[in-house]
Structures are given as structure tokens and as C-alpha cells.
Image (spheres, grey):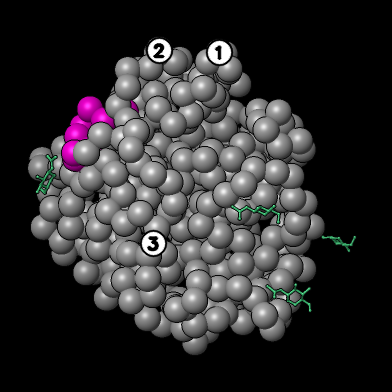
């Protein structure tokens, strides 16, 4: 609880101000982060690939997510019934147009995941770290039998087949489309609406596993292409790709190989696999940084306004220009204002974690 901001109403009015570099009233940084910084990061959280975790560790992670989804959230005045887990869906939904297709795409999601992982530990007694899913280890033709989709060792399988499922128009369809019925999230009810209007919409988690997207996009070669980029600007853009099928990038692909809820642009993180996918994107950035730390812990660039405006709003309130190390990011009621420079190194400052590989 300690990292939450007390002055809720003042903060919520600044909803759209978070990404435009305003100097907001300083919020309390996360207590855990302060502790880690004071310790100099001697005990980093070790983020493992799902396959590297024991069955016990996996069960602990599932238990923590189910715990978070059972705690009443901070945004029930916005949507009655939202859980703490769904606070993050609300945040992602309201920030989506401002944190994708921009220079701070990776830093914002790094901060988002760290905050989520910290809350699992502080409020749900989770002792582990955020797992990641390296989908380049899965053969596209065998995607359905990936341990990730196992009902006992993973997150459960595909949704019911729905003939008229809606997919982005230029994407090959997946194999499901309806509700999932097995695994630890089979009976989850999501309360937040999936489109850009905010209202209560009780619904199940849906999936539509998509081997075609996996065959084209989540391959070892695609990851190698990202890691081979010479600077942050290119690395980030190749990773995030574009809004169309041809230029989806590994980011879009990681959402659409699961499909269903995970393919909802604004509310994709209602699907727990969102967090394993985004941990993997964060890991790719981390790996890229490891190749030349002296330069890459401070290399940041890319536009403040999205390079494609497919996500909707008019961006008149935002400055033109490029993201710098001093660019500010904000998580409303859940966590305070930080700068991009605060999340450049996962083993320094407020952060304290690394990946197994
Ligand atoms: C798909 O089909 C179902 C069942 O016939 C119907 O209820 C639903 O409205 C359809 N959805 C779309 C997007 O056409
Ligand atoms: C989901 O609900 C069904 C029907 O009530 C039940 O049989 C099943 O065990 C539940 N699954 C989980 C993972 O809780
Ligand atoms: C979202 O869905 C609701 C209910 O179907 C509808 O009333 C609203 O107009 C939709 N909003 C948008 C932006 O499509
Ligand atoms: C942002 O960076 C790009 C690429 O380096 C550069 O061409 C552009 O002039 C920059 N824009 C501003 C407003 O500084």
C-alpha cells in the first residue's frame, strides 16, 4: 500500500498530463524501490522464462494474480467492481494512445511491469519475480501445445471456436475467439469495457491462438533483427513495428498469437499473458543494452507524439519533439512520477531485477 499516492482526486485530473513532461507535484516513490536503492541492488529479482520455473513457482505466480484480482481496486468510482488487478487494465486503457508508437513505449512499460510485480509481492505475498515468455522457443505449428497454454503447467488453452470472431481486418484468424474454459483463469470475470468508452462490461477471458502470426513474427530471426539495431530509436521501432499486419513487429505479434482479450488494443492486459509478453519485450531491450552498456544505458529517442495516429485521440495537447532521459511518466493513483532515466538500468536506482538470459 505504501507506494500509492494519497491525493487521488488531484492526480486523476492530471490523467492526460502524465506524458507531456509537466512537473507534477512529487508523489511518493515506491517504498520497496527506495529500500532496494538503499541496498544498492544486492538481491535483484530474477525474472525467469516460464519453462525455467518449478511447478511450485508457477503455482505461486497464479495464486498472486488470483489474489490481486480478488482485492477491490482503486478505480471503482470509474467502473464499479474493478479489482486491484484491473487497476492496471484501467491504467493501460487510459494511457494506451500516449504510450504506444512513441519513444517511451519501452520505458513506460518497464515502469508499469515493475509496479505490477511490486504490488504482487507487497500485497499478495508473492516471493518471486515477474516471469517472461520467450515465444521464439515455441514452434508455430506446435503453439497450442506450448507449456504456456497447458491447463496444468501454464495459463490454460484456447477459447471456444467462434465463427465470426472479430480480428483486425488484415490479420489471419486464430483458432478460437470465445471464452477459455481451463487453467487457473478459466472462471475469471473481467469488469472493464473493451472499447474506448468506459463502462462496466462483465465478461470472460477470450483467446484465439494464432500459429500463422507466430510463424511469421515470433521467430528467433525476428528477435535477432531487433538486437542487431545500432541505436535505441531503430531498436524500439523494429520491436514495436507498426499497426498493420506486414509491420506488426514482435510487440503486436505477442498479443495476437494469444488473440481474444490479449488482442484488445486498449485492455489487452486483462489477459495475464500480457505480463509475460511485455516482460519478454523488456528483456529484449535489456539484452540489447547488455551488448554495449556504457552507451545504451543512456540511449533514448523517439517521438512524444505517436508516429502513427491509429490509436485515436487528437494529440494537440502534446508537444512535438523527442523523448529524452528527463521525460516524465506517471501511473496516476497507483504510482508516482518518474523520469525515463530512472528506468534505464534495471540494476540501479529504483529498479533491481535482471533476466536469466
Ligand atoms: C457472432 O455470432 C453470434 C451468434 O450468432 C452473435 O450473437 C454475434 O452478435 C455475432 N457477432 C458479430 C460481431 O457479428
Ligand atoms: C470454474 O468453474 C467450474 C464450474 O463452476 C468449475 O467446475 C471449475 O473447477 C472452475 N475452475 C477453476 C480453475 O476454478
Ligand atoms: C462502446 O460500446 C458501447 C456498448 O456497446 C457503446 O455504447 C459505445 O458507443 C461504444 N463506444 C465506442 C467508442 O465505440
Ligand atoms: C527528433 O529526432 C529526429 C530523429 O533524430 C529528428 O529528425 C527530429 O528533428 C527531432 N525532432 C525534434 C523536434 O527535435
Q: Quadrant of the N terminus?
A: top right
Q: Residue at x 46, y 23 (%)?
A: 14
Q: Is mark 3 within 8 Å of ligand 4?
A: no
Q: Is residue 53 left or right of residue 254?
A: right
Q: Position of residue 120 (x, y in %)?
A: 59, 37
Spatial CA distance of label 3 from label 1 is 34 Å
Disc number for residue 7: 1
Dot 1: few (<14), some (14–19), or many (≥20) neighbours within 10 Å? few
Q: Label 3: which residue?
A: 251
Do the CB atoms of the residues marked 3 and 1 lie less than 8 Å apart? no
Residues rendered magenta in the picture: 321-328
Q: Is residue 29 left or right of residue 37?
A: right
Residue situated in front as seen by the camera: 308 or 112: 308
Q: Residue at x 65, y 28 (%)?
A: 74
Dot 2: few (<14), some (14–19), or many (≥20) neighbours within 10 Å? few
Question: What secondary structure is found at the residue carrying circle 2?
Answer: loop
Question: What secondary structure is found at the residue carrying circle 1?
Answer: loop
Dot 3: few (<14), some (14–19), or many (≥20) neighbours within 10 Å? some
Residue situated in front as seen by the camera: 94 or 132: 94
Q: Position of residue 130 (x, y in %)?
A: 50, 46
- Residue 187 makes an appearance in the image: yes
Q: Is residue 112 left or right of residue 12?
A: left
Main SS of the magenta part reads: loop
Spatial CA distance of label 2 from label 3 is 33 Å
> For the residues carrying marks 3 and 1, which lies nearer the camera in this image?
1
Do the CB atoms of the residues marked 2 and 1 lie less than 8 Å apart? yes
Amino acid at each position: 500500500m505504501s507506494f500509492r499516492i494519497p491525493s487521488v482526486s488531484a492526480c486523476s485530473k492530471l490523467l492526460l498530463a502524465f506524458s507531456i513532461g509537466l512537473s507534477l507535484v512529487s508523489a511518493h516513490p515506491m517504498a520497496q524501490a527506495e529500500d532496494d536503492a538503499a541496498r544498492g541492488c544486492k538481491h535483484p529479482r530474477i525474472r525467469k522464462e516460464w519453462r525455467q520455473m518449478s511447478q511450485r513457482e508457477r503455482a505461486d505466480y497464479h495464486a498472486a494474480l488470483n489474489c490481486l484480482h480478488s482485492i477491490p481496486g482503486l478505480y471503482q468510482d470509474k467502473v464499479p467492481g474493478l479489482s486491484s488487478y484491473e487497476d492496471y487494465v484501467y491504467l493501460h486503457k487510459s494511457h494506451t494512445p500516449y504510450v504506444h508508437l512513441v519513444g517511451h513505449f519501452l520505458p513506460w512499460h518497464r515502469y508499469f511491469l515493475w509496479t505490477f510485480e511490486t504490488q504482487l509481492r507487497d500485497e499478495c505475498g508473492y516471493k518471486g519475480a515477474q516471469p517472461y515468455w520467450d515465444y521464439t522457443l515455441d514452434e508455430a505449428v506446435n503453439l497450442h501445445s506450448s507449456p504456456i497454454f497447458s491447463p496444468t503447467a501454464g495459463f490454460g488453452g484456447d477459447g471456444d471456436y467462434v465463427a465470426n470472431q472479430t480480428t483486425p481486418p488484415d490479420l489471419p484468424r486464430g483458432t478460437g475467439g470465445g471464452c477459455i474454459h481451463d487453467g487457473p483463469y478459466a472462471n475469471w470475470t473481467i469488469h472493464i469495457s473493451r472499447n474506448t468508452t468506459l463502462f462496466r462490461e462483465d465478461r470472460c477471458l477470450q483467446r484465439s491462438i494464432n500459429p500463422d502470426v507466430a510463424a511469421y513474427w515470433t521467430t528467433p530471426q525476428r528477435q535477432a533483427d531487433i538486437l542487431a539495431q545500432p541505436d535505441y530509436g531503430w531498436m524500439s521501432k523494429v520491436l514495436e513495428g507498426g499497426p498493420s499486419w506486414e509491420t506488426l513487429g514482435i510487440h503486436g505479434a505477442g498479443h495476437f498469437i494469444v488473440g481474444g482479450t490479449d488482442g484488445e488494443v486498449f485492455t489487452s492486459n486483462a489477459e495475464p499473458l500480457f505480463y509475460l509478453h511485455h516482460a519478454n519485450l523488456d528483456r529484449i531491450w535489456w539484452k540489447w543494452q547488455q551488448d554495449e552498456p556504457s552507451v545504451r544505458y543512456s540511449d533514448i529517442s523517439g517521438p512524444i507524439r505517436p508516429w502513427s495516429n491509429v490509436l485515436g485521440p487528437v494529440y494537440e495537447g502534446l508537444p512535438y519533439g523527442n523523448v529524452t532521459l528527463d521525460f516524465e511518466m506517471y501511473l496516476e493513483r497507483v504510482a508516482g512520477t518518474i523520469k525515463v532515466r530512472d528506468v534505464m538500468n534495471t540494476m540501479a536506482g529504483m529498479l533491481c531485477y535482471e533476466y536469466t538470459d
